[in-house]
Image: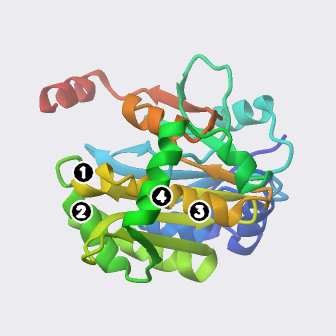
Amino acid sequence: MEIRYVKHRDIDRTRWDATVADDPQGLPYAYSWYLDHATSGQWDALITPDYQYVMPLPWNGKIFGIKQIFAPLLTQQLGIAGPSLSEETTINFLNSIPNKFKKIVYPLNQQIDHPNCRTKTNLVISLTNSHEKIQEGYKKNLIRGIRTAAEKTSINESLLIDDLLTFYQQTLKSQLTFSQKDWQRIRQLLQAATQHLEILMLEVRNEHGQRLALGIFIITNKRIVYLMGCANAEGRKKFSSSFILDKVIKQYAGTNRIFDFEGSDIPGVYKFFKSFGSEEANISVYEKNELPWLVRKGMERRG
C-alpha cells in the first residue's frame, strides 16, 4: 500500500470529505472543516493516492518549536477513514508518520494490539431498537430520575451558541484549562457544524426559567456524538443531564445510528454512562516520544 504525506495546502478537500462521509463509523472529527477549526488550520495528512484511506495529522510546535502530533479540541478520536479498516492498514499508516514529529499522542478510531498504544474507554448504544427496548437496559434509579425530571423541569432546543458556552464555562470553570483562543475555536467549530452537519443543542430549565443543564450533539448519518454537556448543582440533583440524554436517545431510536457518549475513563462519569446500558467500544491511543533528552528534562522541570 502506497501512503503519501501531504501538506495541508495540497489536500483535495472534496475527495477527502467524500472519504470521511463514506467511512462506516460515521465520525465527524475528520472532516476538513472540523479539523480546520479544531486546529486553526494546522493539520497535514497521510493519504493513499486514490484517497481510499485518509489519516489527519494535527500538529503544533509548542514544545520549544519541535513539532508534535496531538488530539485537538473536541476531538475524541481520529485514526484512518476508509472502507474495511484493518489493524494492518492502521499500523502501516502509523509507521508512515514522518520522523519530524518527535512527540505523538494520537487517538485512533479502533482498538489495536501495538506496543505503543494504550486503551481509552469509549461507550456507545446501538439505536437500532425502539426507545422502549433501549430503556430496558437503563438502571431503575435512572428511569425514576428521568421521570422526575420530566415532571419538574422542561427541556428545549436552543440556537444560542454563545449563551450555552457561557453556561458551560461558568459550570465547569474549575475543571477547564481552555484559553480564550480555545473558546473562540470552539465557538467557530459549533457554528461550522450547523452549516455542514445536523447539530442538536438542548437545555433543561427549572420552573423559574433558570438553566440547569445543556447537551450539544453532532449528528451524522451513522452516529450521534455527545460533544459537550454539563449540569449545575441543581441540575445534577434533578437528573437534568439524564433527561437530555434520554430525550436524544428517544428521538433517534430506531434509526440504526450509534449513540456515542465519548468515554469516559473517569470512574464517576463511566458509571453514569453505563447506567444507560451502554457498551464499551474502546479505542487505542498511539503514543511516541522521541524528544531530545534535554527537552524532556526541561518539560519535567516546567511541570
Q: Which mark is residue 176?
A: 1
Closer to the camera, 263 or 241? 241
Q: Which mark is residue 169?
A: 2
Q: At numbered mark 4, what does the secondary structure look like: helix, strand or loop?
A: helix
Q: Position of residue 186 (x, y in %)?
A: 38, 67
Which callout, 4 or 2, points to the residue nearer the camera? 4
Please name the residue shown 34% across and 50% down the image.
61
Could you say which disc has been placed on residue 248 in the image? 3
Closer to viewer: mark 2 or mark 3: 3
Q: Residue furthest top?
A: 115
Measured Cα–Cα span from mark 3 to mark 4: 9 Å
Q: Does the CB distance between marks 2 and 3 fall below 8 Å?
A: no
Badge 3 element: helix
Identify residue type, mark 3: Val
The residue positioned 62% from the left and 38% from the top of the image is 278
Q: Residues within 10 Å of mark 2 (few under 14, many from 20)?
A: some
| Distance (Cα) linking label 4 and label 2 | 21 Å
- Tell me which numbered mark, 3 or 4, is placed earlier along the sequence: 4
Residue 221 at what x, y percent from top left? 75, 65
